Amino acid sequence: MARSWLLTAVLLVAVIGSPAAEALGVNWGTMASHQLPPSTVVRMLQDNGIKKVKLFDADSGPLGALAGTGIEVMVAIPNNMLDMMTDYDTAREWVHKNVSAYNFDGGVSIKYVAVGNEPFLSSLNGTFLNVTFPALQNIQQALNEAGLGDTVKATVPLNADVYESPADQPVPSAGRFRAGLSGLMTEIVQFLNQSGAPFTVNIYPYLSLYGNDDFPLDFAFFDGTSSPVVDAATGISYTNVFDANFDTLVSALAAAGVGGLPVIVGEVGWPTDGDKHATAAYAQRFYAGLLRKLASNAGTPLRPNQYVEVYLFSLIDEDVKSVAPGNFERHWGMTRYDGQPKYYMDLTGQGRNTALAGARGVEYLPRAWCVLNSNSPPDNMSRLGDNVGYACTYADCTSLSYGSSCSGMDAAGNASYAFNAYFQVFDQEEEACGFDGLAVRTLQDPSTGTCNFTIQLETTSDAAGRRTTVATAVLAVFCVLAVMAITLV
Ligand SMILES: *[C@@H]1O[C@H](CO)[C@@H](O)[C@H](O)[C@H]1NC(C)=O
Ligand SMILES: *[C@@H]1O[C@H](CO)[C@@H](O)[C@H](O)[C@H]1NC(C)=O
Ligand SMILES: *[C@@H]1O[C@H](CO)[C@@H](O)[C@H](O)[C@H]1NC(C)=O
Ligand SMILES: *[C@@H]1O[C@H](CO)[C@@H](O)[C@H](O)[C@H]1NC(C)=O
Ligand SMILES: *[C@@H]1O[C@H](CO)[C@@H](O)[C@H](O)[C@H]1NC(C)=O
Ligand SMILES: *[C@@H]1O[C@H](CO)[C@@H](O)[C@H](O)[C@H]1NC(C)=O
Ligand SMILES: *[C@@H]1O[C@H](CO)[C@@H](O)[C@H](O)[C@H]1NC(C)=O
């Protein structure tokens, strides 16, 4: 009897299928010099069965492409707009234009509004301390007034540095909100609790490892560790930093009187370039462990056996993100700048050697590169450093940094990489391959085994769109004439 019940349960799970892809969300950032068309990105989400997406603004391009898909969306108010949102009329106007406007049959299924993005990050020096909570209150109030309060919740994606454990008791059960933030955070989480909104936290095991040579490498992953953190107060042994971090938050919430507040992970992921630990192999290992864990609905030791809503960071590389956090910052994508997967990743959490479905129908610029002209006269060569520096100010050279995919090259290789990156950012325009006569255009791919000299995307900016339209029109006229000529003959 018991056995047949078990068999039924197993069969049921098999029939319902793995809940992993169903439950997974991804972050879709748009800080790239050349972007895939929103419709291409949305099709990639659908091809991969991804049903939740988190945005960093409320731009009408992505939202328009998401309309009618049923994909759940978190839209966002950037930090620099928080101050404005402390005015209620402005908040109401924002909700009207950016949320209510999409609330129709065949519209966008907006579920959350992110009020700011990590506004209390220590490195922001408290700039948004006074405006975030009033903005959160106004946005939720405006959502309520618009009749959307039951289905759309305002939340604040926060960096994990808003909470911590004391240095003399570095265990999850001792988690508290950061000194100095404690009063404000308590007000915020009690407000979230009242409005039925979740706490949103970004957790980065990679950042625990980055710049901390004493951090045990295996503790950043999910396959066991030789150095677990044993929490004497609870008797729990933590084998990965994700669980330890999440449970530190759970303890901080309990101490603030809202121990049951739902938590969603707004960002979690692993970068693939720009640092010795930012590699495709580590990213693959991290996601394999994370996705297996999520698919099992194991939860964390303090919140066991539950589904955790998670948004992976990030869907696509973004080559114009600030590198203030580190050279890895432009390489968080599960796919490259062109929507092609970088490593094996099985969203169902079964660890199969399968890759994400890449973006379809991607249009690239022609197969042309810009490299150092090694025959340049010595006078011009003396200006090489300045020109490389100039190129790297406008283009992404982070793959040249120590420990990165292109770090093994000599000075000439470096210069070629920089010149090409610049040339591609500026759509392969002739003037973009000048550099005091030091550069030359080539049709021969200069890529090496590990270092990719990429070709940028053909973008669908208005200007490019017009060019294409004009070209198509000219071609059409030409074809008509040709057909007429043939007919006449
Ligand atoms: C949202 O609404 C405001 C008006 O309050 C508008 O200025 C803005 O462009 C809209 N879109 C975004 C991305 O915020
Ligand atoms: C924060 O302060 C540091 C040190 O004073 C400064 O270098 C940095 O630019 C400041 N950051 C912001 C976002 O204001
Ligand atoms: C926030 O408010 C406090 C108290 O009114 C004030 O001292 C502080 O300068 C304000 N901070 C910012 C960044 O505006
Ligand atoms: C707020 O938190 C309390 C204590 O955790 C809980 O009992 C209550 O249901 C929560 N309210 C909402 C709206 O979730
Ligand atoms: C190449 O560029 C990187 C990054 O700017 C630099 O660290 C490295 O020293 C350069 N290598 C040579 C040989 O110039
Ligand atoms: C060297 O640089 C000068 C000044 O920018 C330029 O006029 C000249 O054409 C360059 N020489 C070559 C061979 O490109
Ligand atoms: C290098 O980039 C091109 C597109 O620019 C792509 O087709 C190719 O697969 C990439 N190679 C590697 C090793 O990533």
Image (cartoon, rainbow, N blue to C red):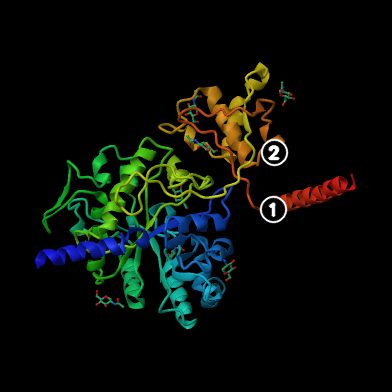
Mark linked to residue 465: 1
Instruction: Say which of marks 2 and 1 sits in front.
Output: 1
Q: Is residue 277 visible?
A: yes
Label 2 CA crowd tier, 10 Å (few <14, some 14–19, many 20+):
few
Compared across the picture, whether 257 is left or right of 41 comes to left
In the displayed structure, 96 sits above or below 69; it is: below
Compared across the picture, whether 63 is left or right of 408 comes to right
The kind of residue on which mark 1 rests is: Gly
Q: Residue farthest to the right? A: 488
Dot 2 falls on a residue whose secondary structure is: loop
**Lower position in the chain sequence, tag 2 or tag 1:** 2
In the displayed structure, 405 sits above or below 264; it is: above
The kind of residue on which mark 2 rests is: Glu
Residue at the image position 66 percent from the left and 27 percent from the top: 440
Dot 1 falls on a residue whose secondary structure is: helix
Residue at the image position 45 percent from the left and 52 percent from the top: 315
Mark linked to residue 399: none
Label 1 CA crowd tier, 10 Å (few <14, some 14–19, many 20+):
few
In the displayed structure, 268 sits above or below 251; it is: above
Which quadrant is the N terminus positioned in? bottom left
Which quadrant is the C terminus positioned in? top right
Residue 284 image point, x, y percent: 35, 43
Quarter location, residue 300: bottom left
Q: Is residue 215 visible?
A: no
Mark linked to residue 429: 2
Compared across the picture, whether 347 is left or right of 254 comes to right
Residue at the image position 77 percent from the left and 51 percent from the top: 470
Residue at the image position 45 percent from the left and 61 percent from the top: 54
Residue 370 image point, x, y percent: 63, 31
